[in-house]
Amino acid sequence: MKKKILCILLLIFAVKAGASTGRSIYNFDFDWLFSRYGLQADGTRLEEPVAAESILFDNRNWKQLDIPLSG
């Protein structure tokens, strides 16, 4: 009987502790941009542009991808 009560109390504590973490969950599955550089399928080589990490970089020709949810 004592083990049963202890298990119930531990379960309640674990649920409460998990619920009160204050975490936020963000979905990063959508709106990724992709462009392939280096060796291409046709054997040509496309060099990576300088400053692609800049907010001013023109990425209009990149492909938009959505990463599938794992499940």
Image (cartoon, rainbow, N blue to C red):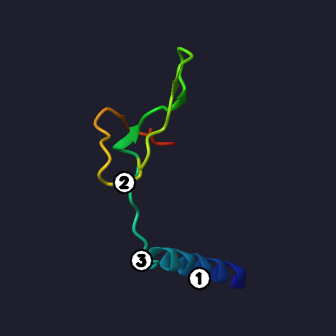
Task: Determine the residue located farthest toward the top in the rendered image.
Answer: 42
Q: Are marks 1 and 2 in contact (CB under 8 Å)?
A: no
Q: Amino acid at mark 3?
A: Gly
Residue under circle 3? 22
Give the alpha-carbon distance from disc 1 to disc 2, as whole Å: 53 Å
Q: Amino acid at mark 2?
A: Ser
| Label 2 sits on residue | 54
In the image, residue 26 above or below residue 58: below
Query: How far is the residue under mark 3 from the one under mark 2?
Result: 33 Å
From the top left corner, tell me how far across and down residue 70 is, in percent: 51, 42
Q: Mark 3 or mark 2: which comes first in sequence? A: 3
Give the image location of residue 22, x and y in percent: 41, 77
Work out whether 28 lies above or below 12.
Answer: above
Q: Nearer the viewer, mark 3 or mark 2?
A: 2
User: What residue is shown at x 35% (from left), y 34% (from top)?
Assistant: 62
- Residue beneath the point at 43% across and 72% down: 23
Q: Which residue is mark 1?
A: 9
Question: Is 17 in front, or is 5?
Answer: 17
